[in-house]
Image (cartoon, helix red, strand yellow):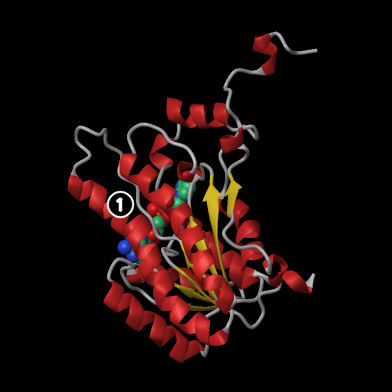
Amino acid sequence: MDRFSLEGRVALVTGAGRGIGFSFAKGLAEAGATVVVNDIRAEAAEEASSAIAAAGGKSDALAFDVTDNATAAKAVDTLVERHGRLDILMNNAGILIRKPVETHDMDDWQRVIDINLSSLYGVARECARHMRKQKYGRIINTGSVMSVSSRPGVISYVAAKHGVVGLTRGLAAELGPDGITVNAIGPGYILTDMNKHVLGSDFEQQVIDRTPLARWADPHELQGAAIFLASDAASFVTGHVLMVDGGMTSNALLVPTADLGLAS
Ligand SMILES: NC(=O)c1ccc[n+]([C@@H]2O[C@H](COP(=O)([O-])OP(=O)(O)OC[C@H]3O[C@@H](n4cnc5c(N)ncnc54)[C@H](O)[C@@H]3O)[C@@H](O)[C@H]2O)c1
């Protein structure tokens, strides 16, 4: 199964101080990559990198704010100086602001668009400078079920995550000739700090009812998709949005078949 090996590859994972990003970083390290853990919280990046190293992985920490493009550009150059190359970018950092449209003001809107969409373009652009020279690169953006569907109360998030699909397809079209693939992963509902406060609420149950696999997921369940898209196994996959959502976005009805009188 060498085609899934990331041995010799160098990966940058943004927002990897905890949650899904940390899980992506661990997964890529287990597949053999040297993983550079980014987070805006320097201590969290260091701790995550140490945890990966303690588990036998090759890792490094590089704290910066992904929305600060000048700093991100320097950080990416530093990464290449330290590790000699940059093969994989997991553009993962993101936030969520829950407010109805009446109070979801322009500052909220701008903050979410900056972190969840514009920064992905900025960091990808800086990484692509190096990937182009290598004629090889893998850019993987973190989308969401909100990349292809919607719900009330998170308007800026829905807009940003739909934008991630456009960004993914646009970059795939432009960077393909340089040997760089660009794909997105669309996670379903995953228990992390971003949403752990809904545990025990009606919302938690609604997610279960809506999801054919009838549960929330653990962050490690996204690792396979990341390793696949980052590996040679996905050499001809680009511009694709891989939903890892327990079937949520392919399920239009909440009503069990038995209640529709269709059960045999
Ligand atoms: N948790 C879910 O159910 C879920 C579902 C779909 C998509 N996602 C997406 O997955 C990604 C990670 O989500 P999570 O649940 O792990 O969230 P999380 O809040 O647990 O972790 C996000 C990490 O990003 C870091 N971060 C925030 N702003 C940053 C910045 N400007 N620069 C660098 N780092 C920054 C945070 O410090 C944190 O460590 C996000 O893009 C999110 O939208 C999450």
Q: Quadrant of the N terminus?
A: bottom right
Q: Position of residue 119 (x, y in %)?
A: 35, 64
> In this rendering, is residue 77 above or below 154?
below
Residue at the (34%, 61%) spot, across then down? 118
Residue 193 at least partly seen:
no
> In this rendering, is residue 191 above or below 22?
above
> In this rendering, is residue 50 above or below 260?
below
Residue at the (39%, 86%) spot, across then down? 78
Residue at the (54%, 60%) spot, across then down? 23
Where residue 79 sits, quadrant-wise, is bottom left
Q: Position of residue 223 (x, y in %)?
A: 61, 59
Q: Quadrant of the C terminus?
A: top right
Q: Which residue is mark 1?
A: 112
Secondary structure under badge 1?
helix
Residue at the far top: name it: 261
Within-10-Å neighbours for mark 1: few <14, some 14–19, many 20+: many
Three-letter code, disc 1: Val
The residue closer to the viewer here, 135 or 89, is 135
Q: How many marks?
A: 1
The residue closer to the viewer here, 187 or 150, is 150
